[in-house]
Amino acid sequence: MPNPYLMLVIAVVICLMLPIAWFSPRSHGFRRTTGVIYLGITLCLVGYPLAATVYHLVSDPGLRSAVPSRFAFSLHRSLSSKLPDYIERRIESKVASTLNRFQITATESPVYGAFFYLQAVERLQEQWLADPSLSKEAPAVTGADAIEASLRIMLDPDHAHWIRAYWGEDHMTEENCFYRMLVIGCITSHHNLTKETRHLPLLKTTVEDLVKEIDSSSTGLIDDYPDQCFPCDVVCCIAMIEHASKALGEDRSGWAKQAMTRVMENFPSGLPPYMAHAPTGAAQEPSRGCTNGFFFTYSAGLAPDDSPVWYRAYVDEFWQENLLAAGWREFSNESDAPP
């Protein structure tokens, strides 16, 4: 990793060269040198990224169509080489035990990131098994250290400090949808990638308890935190339970589809709200882009017949194009909120 202090010194020197050159009209040699330096900087910061982008777009069909992307495997290797050191430093620092529950990014992101990493590696591994030409080595091999580190941070007691502030020491037997969803997803992906069985008893206990929580809810909704229910997290939780059941030698596909139906019956429009009141199913905040993207990652597997209809509504309300850009809005175009 480049020395940040050296980079700062270089940046200051370069920034000083421009006014010096500007106020030195007779120093033609200095001006030429300055011009060469700025040309080099432009090529590095603009030319190289542009060339690399064009190269990958031209050479990688996966960036232009719905086929596996070789660039994704390259990105996986790069990320996997960096994660273990970061995670070890994070755990050893004990900083997680000093954070309060209102420091959302600092508390949620490390374990949420571990969840997404393990989910992504599992998908890449499936693609590689179907087509080994996508990468010289299997993602489970190139990411072996990062896979272990990701589960380690997920199960690290200090990184559950913030969730204990919400649910207490019994956090693994309370509703606690979001955190336990992450635990289930991480253990399942880790097991599927490594065949390690050491954590399966914890997985089984967590799955069974969450199934009871969801089944006992009159609406099929449960809270992430006390009086804070995020329906899209419940949908992900249902998907993680179904996925985990296969690792446990069970079949909960029928249960998962019924649980999904119960959740979505609360929202006739088809798009789940950002937040809802779990006991009644009443929406507390409108549907939002950040959670809808998460929702549609799992909805097709849980409700294959209804998901295309919901997605059409999502496109109609949240997709926006103009002369300069195209992308998803955070708030519906039918609301008064900004994009």
Image (cartoon, grey):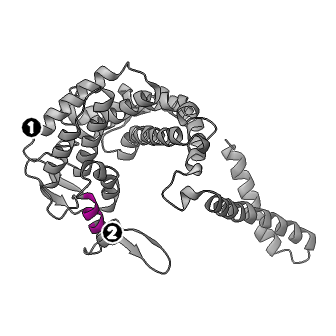
Measuring from the top left, give residue 239's x and y in whole percent: 28, 42
Q: Which mark is residue 254?
A: none
Please name the residue shown 20% across and 45% down the image.
Answer: 257
Give the image quarter of residue 85.
top right
Give the prevailing secondary structure in the magenta stretch: helix
Q: Residues within 10 Å of mark 2 (few under 14, many from 20)?
A: few
**Amino acid carrying mark 2 in the image:** Val
Q: Which mark is residue 216?
A: 1
Q: Residues within 10 Å of mark 1 (few under 14, many from 20)?
A: few
**Amino acid carrying mark 1 in the image:** Ser
Name the side, left or right, on which 146 lies relative to 32: left
The magenta span reads: 307-313
Name the side, left or right, on which 163 lies relative to 269: right
Element on which disc 2 rests: helix
* Residue 186 visible to the viewer: yes
Q: Quick check: 26 above or below 200?
A: below
Measuring from the top left, give residue 146's x and y in whole percent: 52, 32
For the C terminus, give its image quadrant: bottom left
Single out the mark in the foreground, 2 or 1.
2
Please name the residue shown 43% across and 32% down the image.
Answer: 95
Measuring from the top left, give residue 143's x and y in whole percent: 55, 34
For the N terminus, give its image quadrant: top right
